[in-house]
Amino acid sequence: MINIENVRIDLFKISKKEFPGHKRVAAIALRNKSFWIGTNTRKSHPKMFRKFRNGQESACCHAEVYAILQVPRQCRPNIELYVLRFLRNGNISCAKPCNFCQSFIEENNINFKNVFYSDWDWNGNWICLADSI
């Protein structure tokens, strides 16, 4: 299991300029004793490119995608993915993967039963993505 306090401390050390918004999202991929941490970044990924109705275009790399991309391809089906959102004050909030991230998770053969996220009123219990779809 992950130590949330260590993740919180590490995330708040990163410069605010590296995050697209005021929220700091982390995704932690675990496999046995190996782990990879991904955060929202302004770096783009082709899967995350969006064109909006008003003509604007945007791209960033969500934490889930960034964490999964760090995991060796052959290990991806065996990972557990934990997604957290930290607000400015350090409280944990809902971090359910968006539709783009869910499709990316599925494309990488990661079972939704192995994907967990924090809810709005964090009480220490994870929500399984498979149960919420």
Image: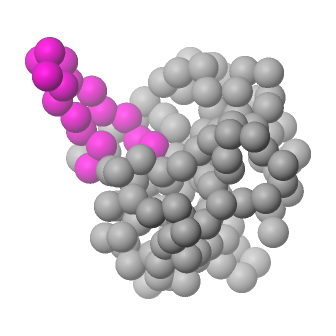
Q: Is residue 82 visible?
A: no
Picture coordinates of residue 26 (x, y %)?
Answer: 63, 46
Res 104 seen here = yes
Image quadrant in which the C terminus is located: bottom left
Residue 83: image x %, image y %?
A: 62, 53
Residue in the picture at 48% in, 24% down: 20
What secondary structure characterizes most of the magenta part? loop
- Which is nearer the eye, 84 or 9? 84
Q: Is residue 121 left or right of residue 30?
A: right
Q: Residue at x 63, y 32 (%)?
A: 24
Image position, residue 70 (x, y; %)? 50, 62
- Determine whether 22 is above or below 71 in the image: above
Tell me which corner region of the image, top left, top right, bottom left or bottom right, holds residue 57: top left
Q: Residue at position x 84%, y 49% from top?
A: 123
User: Up-down: is 66 above or below 85?
Assistant: below
Tell me which residue sits at (72%, 21%) in the image.
88
Range drawn in magenta: 47-62
Quadrant containing the N terminus is bottom right
